[in-house]
Image (cartoon, grey):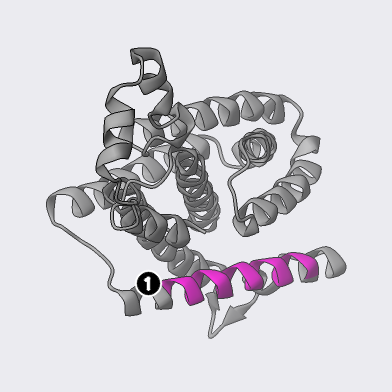
Amino acid sequence: MMNRAINQGAQAGRNQPVMSDQELNNLFNQPAAENRNAGPQVADRAMTYDDVMMKTGVLFTILLAGAVLGWFVPMLAFPAMLVGLVLGLVNAFKKEPSKALIIGYAAFEGVFLGGISSIFESMYSGIVVQAVLATLSVFGVMLALFKFKGVRFGSKMMKFMMIAVGGYAIFSIVNLVFGLAFGTGGVRSMEIFGIPLGIVIGIAATVLAAMTLIMDFQMIEEGVKHKIPEKYSWMCAFSLMVTLIWLYVEILRLISYFRD
């Protein structure tokens, strides 16, 4: 969806119709109010970095509000996770971004994060602060690599990342169903040669989530560069939020393995 929007933005300048002399004269002879109305509508203006930052701030404010509820009522974590999963899939496959569905996703994911954070904190004192600081540190490092070192993904790397993220998403869903069916941690609870698979999978997932941040930054950069419509800033903010939530959960779980 974002690629289509970027292509549309890139083609916009080449697809403008050529006006005749008579049409130009008619345009200049219109009253000032009509000229203002003839201009582009506010809803069609190009996306900017400020748009993405503002939308991201709104979503994380909503997420934190939901996290407060989940922290004090951790039993809501599981149903909130299921609703968030459905909303996340719907948003990911929608052709046009839906502000309401994206905000709904942020709210339910907040309840989920607050709930599991409360549970982990009761088991490992101080783990939530460690996970939050680690998540922010990884975010800062990846942003610095993108901004100052010029780290970018080519088309082949993008395809690899999409396959890797999709494959891990399928694994996570299957592992969740397996764990619920047999009352275990799924594949993560197994060991090979005395090495817990949870640690191996956790490290690989954390690295993958960190690399996905580069994809998010690059998508935002391309969107601003090609002047895609402002409404897609919601999708950019949504994508960034999904990655950070994923990164936090993986780090939280990984720290718990080492604390054990």
198 left or right of 49?
right
Counting from the top left corner in percent of width and height, residue 107 is at 66, 33
219 left or right of 63?
left
Q: Residue furthest front?
A: 22
Residue at position x 51%, y 31% in the image? 60
Picture quarter with the C terminus: bottom right
Residue at position x 28%, y 46% in the image? 20
Inspect the magenta stretch and tell me whether residue 167 lies in it.
yes
Which residue is denoted by mark 1 in the rendering? 158
75 left or right of 140?
right
Residue at position x 20%, y 54% in the image? 145
Alpha-carbon neighbours of circle 1 within 10 Å: few (<14), some, or many (≥20)?
A: some
* Callout 1: SS: helix
45 left or right of 29?
right
Magenta stretch: helix, strand or loop mostly: helix
Tell me how many marks there are. Answer: 1
Q: Is the residue 26 above or below the residue 9 in the image?
A: above
- In front here: 177 or 211? 211
- In front here: 33 or 22? 22
Q: Quadrant of residue 167?
A: bottom right
- In front here: 229 or 178? 229
Disc 1 marks a residue whose amino acid type is Met
Q: Quadrant of residue 133?
A: top left
Q: Residue furthest bottom?
A: 193
Inspect the magenta stretch and tell me whether residue 132 lies in it.
no
Look at the image and give the residue range highlighted in magenta. 161-177
Q: Residue furthest right?
A: 181
Counting from the top left corner in percent of width and height, residue 214 is at 32, 57
Counting from the top left corner in percent of width and height, residue 226 is at 30, 52
Residue at position x 43%, y 22% in the image? 37
- In front here: 178 or 87? 87
